[in-house]
Image (cartoon, coloured by chain):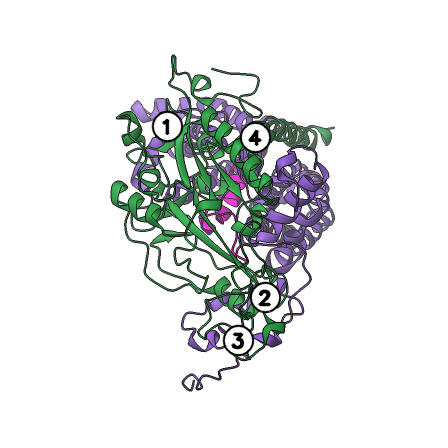
Chain colours: A purple, B green
Amino acid sequence: MTGPTPADPNEPAGARLPEFRIDRPADGQRRRGTGRGWRGRGAGGEQVTVPPVDFTSYYGRPILKPPVWKHDIAGYLFTGGLAAGSALIAAGAQLTGRPRLRQVSRGTALGGIAASTYLLVHDLGRPDRFHHMLRVAKLTSPMSVGTWILTAFGPLAGVAAVAEVAPLLPRHGALGLARRLAPPVGDVAGLVAAATAPALATYTGVLLADTAVPSWHDAYPALPFVFAGSALAAACGVGLIAAPAAETAPVRRLALAAAAIELAGGHRLERMGLTSEPYRQGRSGRLMRAGRALLAVGATAALLSGRSRALSALSGAALLASSVATRFGVFEAGVTSARDPKYTVVPQRERRDQEGDRSPAEKRT
Amino acid sequence: MVHANSLYGPLDPAPDAGYEDAPPRMGFFTDTSVCIGCKACEVACKEWNDVPASGLDLLGMSYDNTGALTANSWRHVAFVEQPRPSGWATPAFEDTPAGPPVSAATATFGAETATHTGTDPGIPSGSPGAAARMVGGSEFLGMPGAQPPGRGTGVEGRSDFRWLMMSDVCKHCTHAACLDVCPTGSLFRTEFGTVVVQEDICNGCGYCISACPYGVIDQRKNDGRAWKCTLCYDRLGAGMTPACAQACPTESIQYGPLEELRGRAAARVATLHGRGVSEARLYGHDPNDGVGGDGAFFLLLDEPEVYGLPPDPVVTTRDLPKMWKRAGLAAVTMAAAAAVAFIGGRP
């Protein structure tokens, strides 16, 4: 870059400012979508075409602070849902006498909840203080409610999964006693875990919605359903991949139900007005579309797979991938909506202009 | 103590939080019509509260090099330059050509600059298109001009302008979403009705940051915890005025019992309207608004979003009962789907 050109006394002040720019953000190019019709960057101020006036802002900066949650939380949405769905399937398998499906699902529930705990603690600004969550129980804080759900679910899922190793223990002595006691204890733990599982899968919808993030908050009626469906789909995916085909008939039916629940919820996500935009556009929109397509493929393949191991595995992989894509899509849509002042200002401005008589001192000039 | 208006609507927050014989609710009234943009409030706050430095960079946002409220800036003076005269004053350039007004280029430049605040998300970059719009056309006076007024054009090309300055701060909402969603109890309501973070409890979960409808609370990077204005809780307890209000040379920042401040603010608006400043309006004063009224409210001379404030914020927890109902319905649906799938196929 050559140095700044000598000052022209007639140029507007600030026209050459971009020449001095040193720290242009790397992702600045991508987010320029809102600047439709805006061009002439760096070529002198007067050529700038100002986009249509649809809202004002303070230097275009976001009003809200975008979430500081890293992708750990998007990952947790997936692993937590997977654990919850698997615990439900494990209980169903236990009650209907499908031992391989039960083992696989109990193992997945434990793995999912262990990964969830790791991701949640890792995302904290002060991971060594994770136990401060256990100081209080607050219904107004979905994160507090979730902490207690996890605290109940985790050990139960753990006991149910560990009970599966009973057949490996010796027949006599103290371990022999454990060998006899483990299966009934595991069964009880598995059933209680399954009773808490739907709460684990759906509270995360409230966790995201109970924020000022426009695309999350406005989606509060839909998110718990999307997440419930996504959780079941992921858990069905693991069942279809790992359990023998002879035991997976209910899983195939459940995959269809999961797809129906998630797609019905997702349909609503796209019809909330302006704050739906991030669910349809950009990276988050692509993730949501990928999630839907994979869900349709996975559910159809599950229906057709019958006793085919290959088709079952394919279906399972599609369902798992669908759940990952949907979770990351919802997460990113929220972050996008908090980063752009448009999603904060325009809906609030419309609401206030409609209720113009509420505070006469604040009428527009 | 559960109250019918615990989540939404007018409320006196300290008694609702369980304080008996609480002192009157204390707050700030920031009258931006007399703010001179000296930033004494920012400095006094940093000094008293031992807030770390927040970078030293020119942001290209007029004289605003703080950028936003962050964990390391608990007061933030916003500067907005507009191509129109102040309502009551003699136009600054009545007899002087003001020169070519600065373009939207400077505003768009200001949208993307960054400084190392040492906080997360700190001052996220904005949208240049939206920034270009804040100038209301091509006649924006961005950075102060380098040339004497009027060079290059005649009187016919001039435009008048005004500066809006506002010292922003945590609003200490009646219904504080940050406090309600805090899963550790680190955020609490004081006996003065203010909202304070206990730094020995906060574990940096970041929930308050997403919950705040004003984008106030923020996280320190090297420390991981959330920080914001305490309304100088330590000074209040000793009967002292918060540092920013103490330092303000024009009484733009006024501290006192909220009821008294609301009365004073209404009188001030009436005075300004009487002087022809019809654009003067209060923001955050109304106990019937979406957050139940702010403990720190403002007199503004333009729409709130011009200053980077949300035009009509609603506390997210207003809808929390409905959210839990939807989650319960989804949970039941999920359990029923699993039950039907396993039972349905049995012979």
| Dot 4 or dot 2, earlier in sequence | 2
Mark 3 on the same chain as mark 1: yes
Of tags 4 and 2, which is closer to the observer? 2
Name the disc covering residue A134, or none. 1
Foreground of the two, A308 or A120: A120
Say which element carries label 1. helix
Callout 3, which amino acid? Pro
Of tags 3 and 4, which is closer to the observer? 3
Residue A115 forms part of the magenta stretch: no
Say which element carries label 4. loop
Displayed quadrant of residue B253? top left
Give the spatial CA distance, label 3 vs label 2.
13 Å
Give the chain of mark 2. B
Is mark 3 in CB contact (under 8 Å) with mark 4? no
Give the chain of mark 4. B
Callout 2, which amino acid? Ser
